[in-house]
Image (cartoon, rainbow, N blue to C red):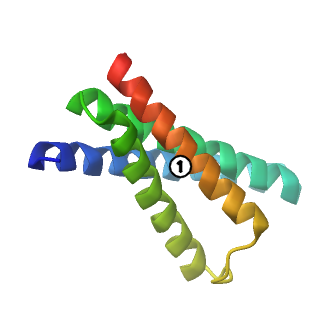
């Protein structure tokens, strides 16, 4: 990977984080007005996570025009690492539980597929 591709990956990662931030702010406002159950909250967080990864991976791979699956994989891995670190800093347990592994696998798969999609659009 050359310097330009790394730049596209970082821009894609930043864009994914911004989408997540906006989504979480919207969800916080809605949850304040209409409290949601834990199941709904977990599902919403998963959906926002996957949409963010998809957007970041498509952006990066579309601009680089090569190695889309790899760019998507790296972006999703870095995104999940950042997401996990922020969760731990916010007071979550350091250990991963079963649903966390499923979330990570889904994120990696969505990243890979979105990277491939970004090359072809």
Which of 77 and 33 lies nearest the eye of the viewer?
A: 77
Question: In this rendering, is residue 38 above or below 75?
Answer: below
Which of 64 and 21 lies nearest the eye of the viewer?
A: 64
Percent of width and height locating residue 111 = 48, 42
Q: How crowded is mark 1: few (under 14 residues within 10 Å), some or many (20 or more)?
A: many
* Image quadrant containing the C terminus: top left
Evaluate whether residue 85 shows in this view: yes
Percent of width and height locating residue 81 = 48, 66
Q: Quadrant of residue 95?
A: bottom right
Q: Residue at x 71, y 56 (%)?
A: 102
Which of 56 and 111 lies nearest the eye of the viewer?
A: 111
Residue occupying the far top of the picture: 121
Q: Residue at x 62, y 53 (%)?
A: 105
Percent of width and height locating residue 68 = 34, 34
Q: In which quarter of the image is residue 66?
A: top left
Horizontally, is 110 left or right of 45 in the view? left
Question: In this rendering, is residue 110 above or below 66?
Answer: below
Label 1 belongs to which residue?
108
Horizontally, is 13 left or right of 103 in the view? left
Secondary element at tag 1 = helix
| Number of numbered discs visible in the structure rendering | 1
Question: In this rendering, is residue 56 above or below 100?
Answer: above
Which of 68 and 18 lies nearest the eye of the viewer?
A: 68
Percent of width and height locating residue 117 = 43, 24
Residue occupying the far left of the picture: 3
Evaluate whether residue 23 shows in this view: no
Q: Which residue is drawn at 34% across and 51% down?
A: 14
């Amino acid at each position: 990977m050359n310097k330009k591709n790394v730049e596209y990956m970082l821009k894609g990662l930043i864009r994914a984080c911004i989408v997540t931030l906006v989504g979480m702010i919207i969800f916080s406002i809605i949850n304040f007005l209409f409290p949601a159950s834990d199941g709904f909250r977990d599902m919403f967080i998963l959906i926002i996570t996957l949409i963010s990864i998809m957007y970041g991976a498509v952006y990066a791979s579309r601009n680089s025009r090569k190695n889309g699956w790899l760019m998507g994989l790296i972006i999703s891995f870095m995104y999940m690492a950042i997401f996990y670190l922020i969760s731990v800093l916010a007071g979550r347990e350091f250990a991963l539980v079963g649903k966390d592994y499923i979330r990570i696998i889904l994120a990696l798969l969505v990243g890979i597929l979105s990277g491939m999609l970004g090359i072809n659009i």
